[in-house]
Image (cartoon, rainbow, N blue to C red):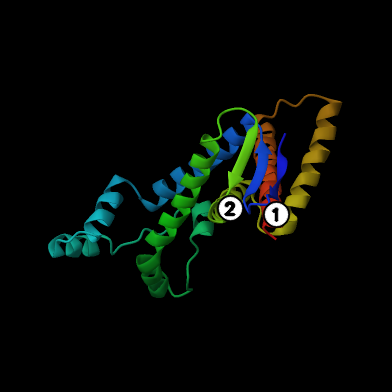
Amino acid sequence: MAHAFRRRPDGSLVCRLDGEEKAIISQVAQETADLIRADLGIDAEGDVLRRAAQSDDPLRRLEAEFAGREAREPSDSAVRRLFPAASEDPLLAAEYRRLGQQDLADGKLSDLRRVMRTLDSTGQGHSEVVLDEEGAMSMLRALNDVRIVLADRLGLERDGDFDTLRMLQQIGERVEDAGPSGDEEHVGSDVVIAVYELLSWLQESLLRALD
């Protein structure tokens, strides 16, 4: 069972998670990273272009500049929440995406990778997760991005929507107690709700420890 984050005398932040909780967080972080890469078209070619942009060869830098001018507009509803349009003007929005979307995506992917590495380094069983200040900020950003994706999948638009959804879930559980329904979709949504609750609690716990 998860134990809330607390700050140690040395300034580090620590919580305790069991193996299943760490595996779930790592899985949804990986799935969020995969979703971003797939929807925005970020792959090995993108890594090649970034290396070319940093090359000492001016021709390679020029090639990378022209190759990277187009920034794909998100098609997935969750990715659109992570990378919203910066302007209602389509031309301005496209220009903002061209100039900044790749850097924003790189930052989000870096945070997600760091969280996965941190959890992986603690082993498979129940253990402490220790973060320095920079790691804590990465954790907060990554948890927020994963929660945004899960909120989209649950159809949540506002903060109060989750309370309503949780209430409907509890009503559904009472109805199920009266007789089996065998509804696989309902079971799937229950899992997503449970993961969303875990991430929300962990994020709030980390914020309190930082304060």
What is the distance, in whole Å, between disc 1 and disc 2 at their CAs? 10 Å
Please tell me which residue is depicted at 38% across the width and 73% down the height of the picture. 91
Q: Quadrant of the N terminus?
A: top right
Measured along the vertical axis of the image, is residue 160 above or below residue 118?
A: below
Q: Is residue 49 left or right of residue 123?
A: left
Numbered label tally = 2
Residue at the far front in the pictured view: 10
Position of residue 74 measured from the top left corner of the image (x, y, whole percent): 44, 56
Identified at 78% across, 24% down, the residue is 180
Residue 108 place in picture, x, y as percent = 47, 54
Q: Quadrant of residue 94?
A: bottom left
Circle 1 is placed at which residue position?
209
Badge 1 or badge 2: first in the primary sequence: 2
Q: Which residue is mark 2?
A: 136
Give amino acid for label 1.
Ala
State the residue at coordinates (69%, 29%): 183
Depth check, front residue: 114 or 141: 114
Mark 1 element type: helix
Density class for disc 2 (Cα within 10 Å; few <14, some 14-19, many ≥20) is many
Question: Mark 1 and 2 residues: CB-CB less than 8 Å, in contact?
Answer: yes
Q: Please state which of residues 147 and 85 is positioned toward the viewer in this rendering.
A: 147
- The location of residue 86, given as percent across then percent down, is 47, 70
Element type at marker 2?
helix
Picture layout, residue 139 above or below residue 63: above
Q: Amino acid at mark 2?
A: Ala
Q: Nearer the viewer, residue 88 or 118?
A: 118
Task: Name the residue located 13 percent from the left edge and 63 percent from the top edge.
Answer: 59
Left or right, 68 with respect to 150, comes to: left
Tell me: 37 left or right of 189: left
Q: Position of residue 174 (x, y in %)?
A: 85, 34
